[in-house]
Amino acid sequence: MYLLSGKSFIKFVMLALLVIVTIVGSVAYGSKTIGYETVWQSLFHFDSENMDHLIIQTSRFPRVVGALLIGAFLAVSGALMQGMTRNYLASPSIMGVTDGSVFVITICMILMPGASSVTLIVASLIGSALGAALVFSVARMLPNGMSPLTLAILGTILGTFLNGVSQAMATYFQVSQNISFWYNARLHQMDPALIQWTIPFAIVGLLIALLVARSITAIALGDDIAQGLGINLVVMKMLTMLSVVILTGISVAMAGKIAFIGLIIPHLTRYIVGQNYKKIIPYAAIFGALFLAWSDIISRWLNPPFETPVGVVTALFGVPYFLYLIKTRGGRSV
């Protein structure tokens, strides 16, 4: 109940208002600016013959909703990975999880060109699990393989390998055009039906994240401390990775690869709310949602009327911060 009292309640109200402002701003701004009154009317008094209303309902509103959800999912995934591994450099994009998703989606598109939304989601989930399993399995076979810097380098190498194989297969089987969406995230191609299909998976992934939050707080302090508190490390880590796989998998299925959200946002969240993952998880979700939604708005502003890929914007923030972490904390655990 701590989220519903005192300063925490005020913070959540302010953040909720900021989310609303973000939604309105994202819907109104684009290659064609639409007035706020029109935005309001399209949401509550929809007119199917009004072109602006159609643009909002079929393109811009799904786009901002997708951006908010994906930002939240990736931020929570990154927070869980960093807490579980006690690694400041851990995130789905660095640990090969997103590349694993794209790899299996590529195979799916080759074998089943007309795959349904559910099939793509399942393929992405399998790929997330494959990417994570590959990186951590190889890491355990190497001397000092689980150290923060080694794990990050290994994840980057294996992720690049999976990405290269995916693109080679796509080129050979001539499906590059069909899967280009997943290599270069394009939020403007958000499929409303796909968003709807991800909701049940998202609920499960987020509930698991909240369930393991207390245990992750202890694990982040050290396995010995966690065991001393009676926490079953194997079960909790498996549940944590299940949540990461689900949330990352559905994110990639919706919009392709988007990097650095899972790296940056957990650090920002811990700085603001402390080390308690019962607070980190919900706040990281909100901060991640806002970060990606505003990155999307910036991507439209950089080179109008053309749109810059949103991954470029997240990289502008993420790459310098990644290098900073390597320099200052790369060799140490959380």
Image (cartoon, rainbow, N blue to C red):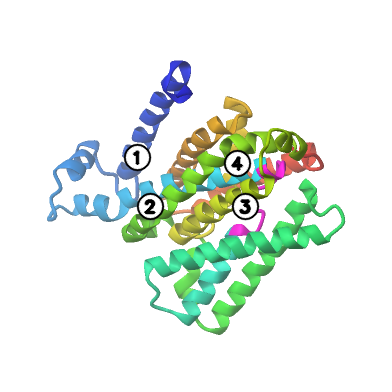
What secondary structure is marked by label 2? Answer: helix
Question: Could you tell me the amino acid type at mark 3?
Answer: Met
Mark 4 lies on residue: 79
Horizontal and vertical percent for residue 29?
A: 34, 43
Magenta range: 84-97
Question: Could you tell me the amino acid type at mark 1?
Answer: Ile
State which mark lies toward you, 2 or 1.
Answer: 2
What secondary structure is marked by label 1? Answer: helix
Mark 2 lies on residue: 199
Mark 1 lies on residue: 23
Considering only order in the chain, which callout, 1 or 2, is on the residue closer to the N terminus?
1
Mark 3 lies on residue: 238
User: Could you say which is closer to the camera, residue 77 or residue 182?
Assistant: 77
What residue lies at 66% left-to-right and 61% top-to-bottom?
A: 133
State which mark lies toward you, 1 or 3.
Answer: 3
Considering only order in the chain, which callout, 2 or 4, is on the residue closer to the N terminus?
4
Q: Residues within 10 Å of mark 1 (few under 14, many from 20)?
A: many
Residue 167: image quadrant is bottom right
User: Could you say which is closer to the camera, residue 163 or residue 85?
Assistant: 85
Q: Are marks 2 and 3 in contact (CB under 8 Å)?
A: no
Considering only order in the chain, which callout, 4 or 1, is on the residue closer to the N terminus?
1
State which mark lies toward you, 2 or 3.
Answer: 3
Q: Is residue 12 left or right of residue 265?
A: left
Q: Residues within 10 Å of mark 2 (few under 14, many from 20)?
A: few
Question: Could you tell me the amino acid type at mark 4?
Answer: Ala
- Report if residue 305 is visible in the image: no
State which mark lies toward you, 3 or 4.
Answer: 3
